[in-house]
Structures are given as structure tokens and as C-alpha cells.
Image (cartoon, rainbow, N blue to C red):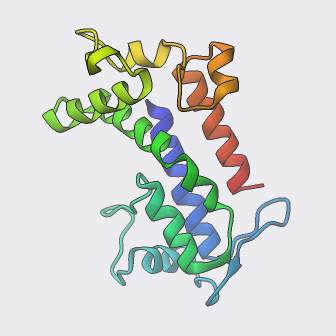
Amino acid sequence: MGVVSAWEEFLERTLVRYVAGAVADNGYSPTHKYGSGDSINHAYELLSQSASYDPQKHYLKVSEPRWVWRMADFFFSQHTYTCLSNKNDLLKGANSIRNRVAHDSEKCKTDFKSTTIWFLSPQNGQLKQGLGPGSLLTMAVQKNFGQPIVQSGTSHFEAYMQLYEQLAQSIVP
């Protein structure tokens, strides 16, 4: 799911730029508690808490929604990243689906199985053998995305696309 990577890139770029004092096209900018960073590089140093941070060699923890909104809580007195808090489980689920596609490790398999059980609630907690990320993503949503999406017969993939769009519009209003 390249979409998950694009989402994480969006989170990183917006958070770094907001810390550096950027203003969205519509004039929105979060309210800084302590002042803004001097540059994008300085914002990376502040967010990573490392004066030697190199975005080519290191990464911010944007795959962890809680880290993102907690960092925003630290730097801003008002911000739009709070929208991530009540979608944390869905975002973590997307990560486990993506990781299962990208990795064949036992941890990724176990996380994917837990996520799939969370989405499908199969009888006795048993999944169909061979159920993979592609199958899950094309299945209709049964729970966790909200009743309107469940009733519409939307696939998990399309539900995630709608979720990412909604969150992005909340973060950059």
C-alpha cells in the first residue's frame, strides 16, 4: 500500500513545515507555544531532538499517529493533528496491512492477523487460510469505519482512501 507511505510523507512534511512556521494556502497555521524553527532543517532537528539530524539517514516516527499528535501538542498550543487521536487504531491497522505486503516476518504476519481479526471478527477468531492484504482490502467494511461506510458496502481500500482524504483536509484545512 504505497498510499500509507504517501500518507506518512504528508504527515512528516506538514508537521515539519508547520514547526518551521509555514502557513497553508488558506492562511491557517498552528499556534506555536515557543516560536517556530528557523528553517526546515532546524524543524527536523527540533522534532527529532537531535542537532545532527539528517533526513537522508534518519526518520521521524510519523508511522506512529500518537507520536505525531503528541509532538504537535508539544510545539503548538492549537493545532489540527488532534484529528489523528480518534483514528489511531485505523491508522495502525493500515500500517500492519502495508507492513505485511512489504515484509514476510513473523511479527508482520502476526500484526496483520490481529488487524484482520479486528476488522472481520470471524467466528472463533479463525481466519480463512490464505487471506492476504489484497483480499482484506477488497472486502466490504464490516465495522470500525463507522456505520455509514459499513452500510454503503465500501471496501476497506476505499474506506482508507476516504479516511486519508478526510484527515488530510482536517490537518491542512
The quadrant where residue 60 appears = bottom left
The residue drawn where x is 66% and y is 26% is 147
Instruction: Count every numbered label the image shows and give the total.
Output: 0
Quadrant of the snapshot with the N terminus: top left
Residue 59 vertical position relative to residue 111 in the rendered view, above or below? below
Q: Is residue 11 above or below residue 166?
A: below
Relative horizontal placement of residue 76, taking residue 113 as reference (left or right): right
Q: Residue furthest right?
A: 26
Instruction: Please provide percent x and percent y for residue 111.
Output: 27, 36
x, y percent for residue 118? 39, 30
Instruction: Look at 50% across and 34% down and name the residue there.
Output: 3
Farthest-out residue, bottom: 34
Relative side of 160 to 100, left or right:
right
Taking the spot 30% from the left edge, 62% from the top edge, the residue there is 57
Q: Percent position (x, y) of residue 131?
A: 30, 13
Q: Position of residue 76 (x, y in %)?
A: 63, 78
Toward which corner of the image does residue 146 lie, by quadrant? top right
Up/down of 46 relative to 29, above or below: below
Q: Nearer the viewer, residue 25 or 144?
A: 144
Q: Is residue 64 above or below residue 22?
A: above
Residue 153 placement, left or right of 110: right
In the rendered image, the residue lying farthest to the left is 106
Could you tell me which quadrant the C terminus lies in? bottom right
Residue visible at 80% across and 66% down in the picture: 28
